[in-house]
Image (cartoon, rainbow, N blue to C red):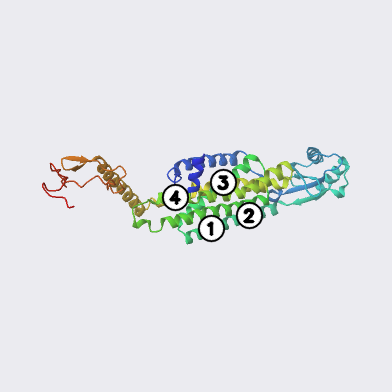
């Protein structure tokens, strides 16, 4: 674990995110298929703001519980769609029903008051028409489409269209995964859900742009050399920004987790759970997609270009040639006179021996004359 954390903080490209992109694609595809299956089987629990209907706010008095409040409204002749507890300045219950006429809504209100003993003036009712709900739905979809178009145009202008495609793939992944979790859990879709979706799209885009900026920096002028392929330079960029992405995501998820698990779970603030869930799931999915999907998609598209394919062939050919020269330099002995000298194992990348004892092949070794020092003529006198 310590070595893994050290490599993560070093950011030296130790993790092969781009090289294993097929694995990440399979994981994302499985998650998306589960989400699509939930769309078809379970569907969505749209709130009255989208589907229309009535809502009744009943104070938590006279020992009335959430289940009792829901049952009282149903016994009064209304079709209960959802019921949740509201904890704020006043403890109350929010019961949503299918669409009712004004007279029917009034009858339900007084029937609840008679059954629970709560004054009718303290029970509030609200009616949302289906036409208003359809307008809200259309405006939400229009806002989402405009957001995606503007983001695509910006990324294509700031970087290139392939990076815009990678960012859009990551954003659509985040949207579908978040919507799939919403469908599986069955939480009510409200305007807060739409606001949360737009928020997570901005967060995911920010994280993706940070990685793309580093990719552009690493790949600048890469075609003029033969050291790295585009995928290797992009993978290095992910590693260099990995801890920044993780730290940013964790810091953002902590308050959202408090909102979801403490506010909605422990304290029972039911109105917060829709916003808390969409933010928590969307931010987690955005952190995943910015690392495992966006840049690998861009790398796959770039490697299909002829110039980057040629760069990849050139880099691999150079590495094969260098490896062959190094192997030949280590394996072949260097002749020295009548014997051999072994090359230093610490020879550099070009195969140059690092040992002082190794002599170039062909140079004669000094002969040792009898009765004297090596290399000194016989009979010479030593100076005093």
Label 1, label 4: how far apart the Cα atoms are: 25 Å
Q: Nearer the viewer, mark 2 or mark 3?
A: 3
Label 1, label 2: how far apart the Cα atoms are: 17 Å
Q: Nearer the viewer, residue 329 or 340?
A: 340
Q: Nearer the viewer, mark 3 or mark 4?
A: 4
Q: Residue furthest bottom?
A: 157
The spot of residue 50 in percent (x, y) is 68, 50
Say whether residue 198 is left or right of residue 15.
right
Query: Is label 2 in a helix, a strand or a loop?
Result: helix
The spot of residue 245 in percent (x, y) is 54, 50
Circle nearer the N terminus (1, 3): 1
Q: Nearer the viewer, mark 1 or mark 2?
A: 1
Q: Which mark is residue 285?
A: 3
Query: Is label 3 in a helix, a strand or a loop?
Result: helix
Circle nearer the N terminus (1, 2): 2
Label 1, label 3: how far apart the Cα atoms are: 18 Å
Q: Nearer the viewer, mark 2 or mark 4?
A: 4
Q: Which residue is mark 4?
A: 236
The spot of residue 170 in percent (x, y) is 52, 49
Say whether residue 89 is left or right of residue 246.
right
**Residue that appears at 56% across and 52% down:** 204
Q: Nearer the viewer, residue 263 or 36?
A: 263
Q: Quadrant of residue 261?
A: top right
Query: Is label 1 in a helix, a strand or a loop?
Result: helix
Q: Which residue is mark 2?
A: 140
Circle nearer the N terminus (2, 4): 2
Q: Nearer the viewer, residue 80 or 244?
A: 244
Label 3, label 4: how far apart the Cα atoms are: 22 Å
Q: Is residue 32 visible?
A: yes
Circle 4: is it few (<14), some (14-19), or many (20+) Cα within 10 Å?
A: many
Q: Which residue is mark 1?
A: 151
């Amino acid at each position: 674990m310590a070595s893994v954390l050290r490599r993560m903080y070093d950011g030296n490209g130790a993790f092969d995110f781009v090289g294993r992109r097929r694995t990440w694609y399979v994981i994302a595809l499985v998650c998306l298929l589960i989400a699509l299956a939930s769309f078809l089987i379970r569907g969505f629990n749209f709130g009255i703001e989208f589907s229309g209907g009535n809502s009744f706010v009943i104070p938590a008095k006279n020992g009335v519980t959430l289940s009792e409040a829901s049952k009282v409204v149903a016994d009064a002749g209304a079709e209960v769609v959802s019921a949740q507890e509201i904890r704020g300045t006043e403890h109350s219950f929010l019961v949503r029903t299918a669409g009712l006429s004004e007279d029917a809504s009034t009858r339900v209100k007084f029937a609840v008051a008679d059954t629970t003993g709560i004054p009718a003036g303290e029970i509030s009712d609200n009616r949302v028409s289906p036409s208003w709900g359809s307008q809200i739905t259309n405006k939400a979809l229009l806002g989402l489409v405009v957001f995606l178009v503007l983001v695509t145009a910006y990324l294509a202008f700031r970087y290139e269209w392939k990076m815009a495609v990678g960012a859009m793939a990551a954003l659509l992944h985040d949207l579908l995964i978040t919507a799939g979790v919403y469908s599986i859990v069955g939480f009510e879709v409200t305007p807060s859900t739409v606001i949360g979706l737009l928020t997570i799209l901005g967060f995911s885009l920010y994280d993706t742009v940070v990685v793309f900026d580093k990719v552009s920096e690493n790949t600048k002028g890469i075609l003029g050399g033969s050291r790295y392929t585009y995928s290797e330079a992009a993978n290095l960029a992910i590693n260099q920004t990995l801890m920044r992405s993780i730290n940013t995501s964790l810091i953002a998820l902590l308050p959202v987790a408090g909102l979801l698990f403490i506010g909605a779970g422990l304290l029972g603030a039911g109105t917060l759970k829709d916003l808390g869930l969409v933010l928590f799931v969307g931010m987690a999915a955005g952190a995943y997609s910015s690392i495992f999907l966006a840049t690998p998609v861009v790398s796959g598209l770039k490697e299909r270009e002829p110039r980057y394919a040629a760069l990849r062939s050139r880099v691999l050919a150079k590495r094969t040639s260098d490896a062959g020269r190094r192997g030949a330099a280590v394996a072949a002995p260097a002749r020295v006179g009548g014997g051999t000298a072994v090359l230093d194992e610490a020879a550099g990348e070009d195969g140059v021996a690092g040992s002082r004892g190794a002599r170039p092949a062909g140079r004669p070794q000094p002969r040792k004359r009898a009765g004297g020092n090596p290399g000194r003529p016989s009979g010479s006198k030593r100076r005093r």
